[in-house]
Amino acid sequence: MSAPGHLPMRLQAAGAHLLVRMVEPEALDWSAPFFRDAVPADAAAQSMQPYAAWKAAQNPPDPDYSDVAIIAHVARCGSTLLARNIAANDRTVVLSEPPFFAALHGRLGQLASEREALDAALAILASWRGWAKARGKRLVLKLSSQLGPFLPLLHRQMPGARFVLLHRDPLPVLESLARKRTSRLRAEAEGEGAGILPELEGLDADRYLLAAASSYLRAITAMGVLADKAPCIAYADLAARYPEICRALGLDPADAPPWNGAINAKARGQARHTPYTPVPTAELDAFAAAHPALLARLQGDYHRLCAKHPMPAL
């Protein structure tokens, strides 16, 4: 087993070696918006061992994942705001985009196959499941939007897990991604990783936007596969449907504070209490006018998803 009192934090490729890094959960900064930001600066010195040796010492994960709830989403759709609201419930442990699931889309080190990457992620998740259960808490996992293509696989391999799917119209998603550009999408624009979908080539001159649109389209396509098995929630409905979302994730809404839409979700410390300022309509209109063909293509797919899986009445 892993070192006493420690839990696996992430996989790390270092030259020819693949390592598991461990960290004390009690040392995490649980107010951080993302799991990677919660890890103390000295985590590298706490505990580290070769992945193969660590994996060989682990018990197989419990095949019943009913103790796990999963938030899957497109980028910039309020998933971090939802995660921070759920984290206010002291009966939960929320892992927001834990790095160990990056093995699926990153194929770390010697993990050449999807099966190996999934086994690694689930093995590390097993320790977090045990830690949460021992404290009488429900584990809620907010996935990265990069994992969109893997949602059907995760749903099959995690029987009993409660999934909620969050989506949003592509206009504000792409406008936000264009305004706050990410290194991942820059790399995909240059041909790394998942890259640009062939059907989107030529729809815009900005290859970064084509990479962002490809990521969005992959995510909503996967949601279309799972929408009959999990609730699909639109960004605009998060506040109104928050109690329903809690129940879908296996939580009792009465155990948590009411929805707080004033959280500045991705900020830390006192900045969290600075109200979020929506993008002015004029700026969204200008972005739409500058990228008509790409947005028309995405909105067609998005509206088909919404028409096929309409929201049930509250």
Image (cartoon, rainbow, N blue to C red):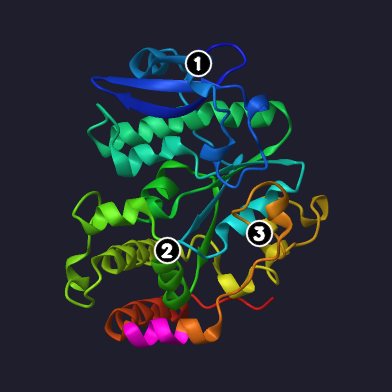
Residue 95 percent across, percent down from the top left: 58, 41
Badge 1 or badge 3: first in the primary sequence: 1
Compared with residue 267, is residue 139 higher up or lower down, i.e. above or below?
above
- The residue wearing badge 3 is 264
In the image, what residue occupies the spot 52% across and 65% down?
77
Give the spatial CA distance, label 2 vs label 1. Answer: 40 Å
- The residue wearing badge 2 is 223
- The residue wearing badge 1 is 45
Residue 58 percent across, percent down from the top left: 46, 17
User: Circle 1 sits in a helix, a strand or a loop, which is it?
Assistant: helix
Name the residue type under label 1: Ala
Contact (CB < 8 A) between labels 1 and 3? no
User: Circle 2 sits in a helix, a strand or a loop, which is it?
Assistant: helix
Is residue 293 found left or right of 266 in the rendered image? left
User: Circle 3 sits in a helix, a strand or a loop, which is it?
Assistant: loop
Is residue 314 found left or right of 306 in the rendered image? right
Report if residue 62 is visible in the image: no
Is residue 128 found left or right of 137 in the rendered image? left
Q: Quadrant of the C terminus?
A: bottom right
In the image, what residue occupies the spot 17% across and 67% down?
198
Circle 2 crowding by C-alpha within 10 Å: few under 14, some 14–19, many from 20: many
Contact (CB < 8 A) between labels 2 and 1? no
Name the residue type under label 2: Met
Residue 307 percent across, percent down from the top left: 45, 82
Count all numbered tags in the image, as a single digit. 3
Where residue 177 sits, quadrant-wise, is bottom left
Badge 3 or badge 2: first in the primary sequence: 2
Circle 1 crowding by C-alpha within 10 Å: few under 14, some 14–19, many from 20: few
Q: Is residue 287 magenta?
A: yes
- State the extent of the magenta-drawn residues as a range: 285-290
Q: Is residue 192 magenta?
A: no
